Image: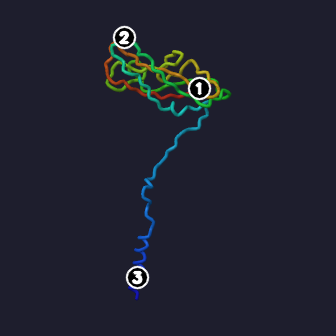
Amino acid sequence: MKKAIIGSAVLAALSSSVFAAAPQVGSGNPGVITFTGEIVAGACGIDSNSLDQTVSLGQVPAHDFAKTGDRSPAQNFDIVLTDCDTTTSANAYFTFTGTADTIVPGLFATTGGAGNVGIRLQTAAGEYLDNGTEQKAPVVLSNGNNTVRFGAMYESTAATVTPGEADSVANFTVRYQ
């Protein structure tokens, strides 16, 4: 009798697993969504499309650089400050930082095969911005969104520029006053 009870219990346990709910076909795999952002104390936020940008400087012939300090045409890029409140701060100052060129530290060093060239930044008003140095002329803010334009260009650090890829990265910060 004991064997019959144990056998029935084992049979009941095995048969219950047959009736367990199977995963639904076509329900897909679980996924993950990561949210990022920051609450800031400044007068403005920064539009998410302005935080990570790629600016193409194009293909510039090496013969365009005949002497030290020659520059390619500037390629514009914008940083959009959002929801600015001028009662908090009326001016913004930008600082761009990155790896400094070894010959001209005010330029951003390039990676790739090109030689004797760095990247120069400037404001829309024409002020050249040195790597790691805050701009001198403020961006005068207005309430709401403000689009701030900058330019980027190649600048030769010697009389002869070697052809090749010439890429760089710059980070930026904004100080409000």
Q: Which of pointers 2 and 1 indicates the residue nearer the eye?
A: 1
Q: Is residue 60 left or right of residue 132?
A: left
Residue lying at 56% horizontally and 38% vertically, measured from the top left: 38
Image position, residue 164 (x, y; %): 32, 23
Image position, residue 51 (x, y; %): 50, 32
Residue 106: in sight, yes or no? Answer: no
Q: Which of pointers 2 and 3 indicates the residue nearer the eye?
A: 3
Dot 3 lies on which element?
Answer: helix
What type is the residue that disc 3 sits on? Ile
Residue at the top extreme of this rendering: 67
The foreground one among 108 and 70 is 70
Neighbour tally class for label 1: few under 14, some 14-19, many 20 plus, Cα within 10 Å: many
What residue is shown with label 1?
146
Tell me which corner region of the image, top left, top right, bottom left or bottom right, holds residue 108. top left
**3D distance between C-alphas at marks 2 and 3:** 95 Å
Neighbour tally class for label 2: few under 14, some 14-19, many 20 plus, Cα within 10 Å: some
What residue is shown with label 2?
67
Residue 61: in sight, yes or no? Answer: yes
Residue lying at 52% horizontally and 18% vertically, measured from the top left: 124
**3D distance between C-alphas at marks 2 and 1:** 37 Å
Residue at the front extreme of this rendering: 26
Dot 1 lies on which element?
Answer: strand
What residue is shown with label 3?
6
Image position, residue 26 (x, y; %): 43, 55
Image position, residue 88 (x, y; %): 66, 29
Q: In the drawing, what numbered circle is on residue 23?
A: none
Dot 2 lies on which element?
Answer: loop
What type is the residue that disc 2 sits on? Lys
The mark nearer the N terminus, 2 or 1, is: 2
**3D distance between C-alphas at marks 3 and 1:** 78 Å
